[in-house]
Image (tube, rainbow, N blue to C red):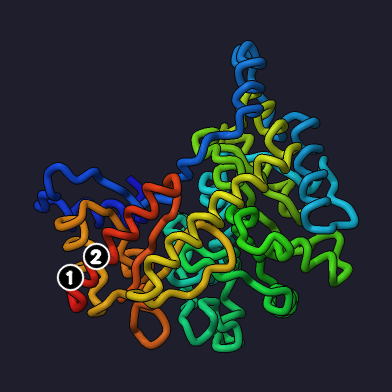
């Protein structure tokens, strides 16, 4: 077996299961999980109908590039959403089976092992960035996201000699787990650094459609390129998904878009990889990308939850007000996030993810996720509010944990 597999770290939910393995939660108390970022709102009905209407197409092999109608729906959506002058549906768009699969695959296709292959990523982070890097023979470069930098990486803290070894930089905006949004100025600075040091920027924007201020949608990397007049999106790719936007995590549908000179070899790689999206799923995806009403309703539901949970928890927990996404990132009273998560599960049957499980020792040797929790506000509003009430009760009963 590939020896690089041994370098993979346990996934956060493996560690959480081990943490709670010998815990018996209270009887008669219904479990509520705030651990996994899996939307529990109703899936977009028209997408499910399209899936059923085209079920006979399961009898046909799909093409790696996807249906022209799907690429056009994606290009039209991205052009509208991010104010692009153009996005070539043939050369600059590639449908994929969700962002997780595509992010992992792209790292395998992108890294040049004949020279130093460092991959910069936010810390804490979505662990696929790290795992994909290790299995491609690369070296992770952890960019800490701390409160003092607005929970975003400090690009200026990276020395020029380090940037010269970087082949790929991951951006996650809106951020998982922090909810921080990358502003235009930081995208533009990153593009400047990419031009100077010749690396690729991969922007994971799968939470981009879940934002709290309807008048202030999060900016995207391609949007920043367009503002700079870079309509070829050189060195830049974005990853988007229907999982969060349309409550369709099981559909495994998303897209990669940007630099045609990166899309073309990646499409060739995927032809050998054998991961084309099935035709019925493509038709369901077309329906979802073509409708915005259900996405606005989805945002309204999350706003209601954030308001309810903030009112309950703000008196007892310190957390940044998220700009987008569906996570809260509170500091833990007492500072031990793993002990807190274990005790909360044991006493209140509420599952939360320790922040330290999503980070690594970074600049200064400390884990920037330590002492925090990731709370995924994905359940319906009453269940989420009940979890918040139990969490507050737990803190008020044992504030030092």
x, y percent for residue 214: 69, 60
- Which of 4/74 is in front? 74
- Residue 236, relative to residue 29: is it above or below? below
Could you say which disc has been placed on residue 393 in the image?
Answer: 2
**Secondary structure at numbered mark 1:** helix
Q: Residue at x 33, y 75 (%)?
A: 316
Q: Is residue 73 left or right of residue 241?
A: right
Could you say which disc has been placed on residue 397 in the image?
Answer: 1
Q: CA distance from mark 2 to mark 1?
A: 6 Å
- Which of 255/289 is in front? 289
- Which of 235/214 is in front? 214
Q: Residue at x 56, y 47 (%)?
A: 244
Question: Which picture quadrant has residue 294?
Answer: top right
Contact between labelled residues 1 and 2, with CB atoms less than 8 Å apart: yes
10 Å crowding of disc 1: few (<14), some (14-19), many (20+):
few
Q: Residue at x 66, y 69 (%)?
A: 199
x, y percent for residue 334: 23, 79
10 Å crowding of disc 2: few (<14), some (14-19), many (20+):
some
x, y percent for residue 42: 52, 35
**Secondary structure at numbered mark 2:** helix
Q: Can residue 118 be seen in this snapshot?
A: no
């Amino acid at each position: 077996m590939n020896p690089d597999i041994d370098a993979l770290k346990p996934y956060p939910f493996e560690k959480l299961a081990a943490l709670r393995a010998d815990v018996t939660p209270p009887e008669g108390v219904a479990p509520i999980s705030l651990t996994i970022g899996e939307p529990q709102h109703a899936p977009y009905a028209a997408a499910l109908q399209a899936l059923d209407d085209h079920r006979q197409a399961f009898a046909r092999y799909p093409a790696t590039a996807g249906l022209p109608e799907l690429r056009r729906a994606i290009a039209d959506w991205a052009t509208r959403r991010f104010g692009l002058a153009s996005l070539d549906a043939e050369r600059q768009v590639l449908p994929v089976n969700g962002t997780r699969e595509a992010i992992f695959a792209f790292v395998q296709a992108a890294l040049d092992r004949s020279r130093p292959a460092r991959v910069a990523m936010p810390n804490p982070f979505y662990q696929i960035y790290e795992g994909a890097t290790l299995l491609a023979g690369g070296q992770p470069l952890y960019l800490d996201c701390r409160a003092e930098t607005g929970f975003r990486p400090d690009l200026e803290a990276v020395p020029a000699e380090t940037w010269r070894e970087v082949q790929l930089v991951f951006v996650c905006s809106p951020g998982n787990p922090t909810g921080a949004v990358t502003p235009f100025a930081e995208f533009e600075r990153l593009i400047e650094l990419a031009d100077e040091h010749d690396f690729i920027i991969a922007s994971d924007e799968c939470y981009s459609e879940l934002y709290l201020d309807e008048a202030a949608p999060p900016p995207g990397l391609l949007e920043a390129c367009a503002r700079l007049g870079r309509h070829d999106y050189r060195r830049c790719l974005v990853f988007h998904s229907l999982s969060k936007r349309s409550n369709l995590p099981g559909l495994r549908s998303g897209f990669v878009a940007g630099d045609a000179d990166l899309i073309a070899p990646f499409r060739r790689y995927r032809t050998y990889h054998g991961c084309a999206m099935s035709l019925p799923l493509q038709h369901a995806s077309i329906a979802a990308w073509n409708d915005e009403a259900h996405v606005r309703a989805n945002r309204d539901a999350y706003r209601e939850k954030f308001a309810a949970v903030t009112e309950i928890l703000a008196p007892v927990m310190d957390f940044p007000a998220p700009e987008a996404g569906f996570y809260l990132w509170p500091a833990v009273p007492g500072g031990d996030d793993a002990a807190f998560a274990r005790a909360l599960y044991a006493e209140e049957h509420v599952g939360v993810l320790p922040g330290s499980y999503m980070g690594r020792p970074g600049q200064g040797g400390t884990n920037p996720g330590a002492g925090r929790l990731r709370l995924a506000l994905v359940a319906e509003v009453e269940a989420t509010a009940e979890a918040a009430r139990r969490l507050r009760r737990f803190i008020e009963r044992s504030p030092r944990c």
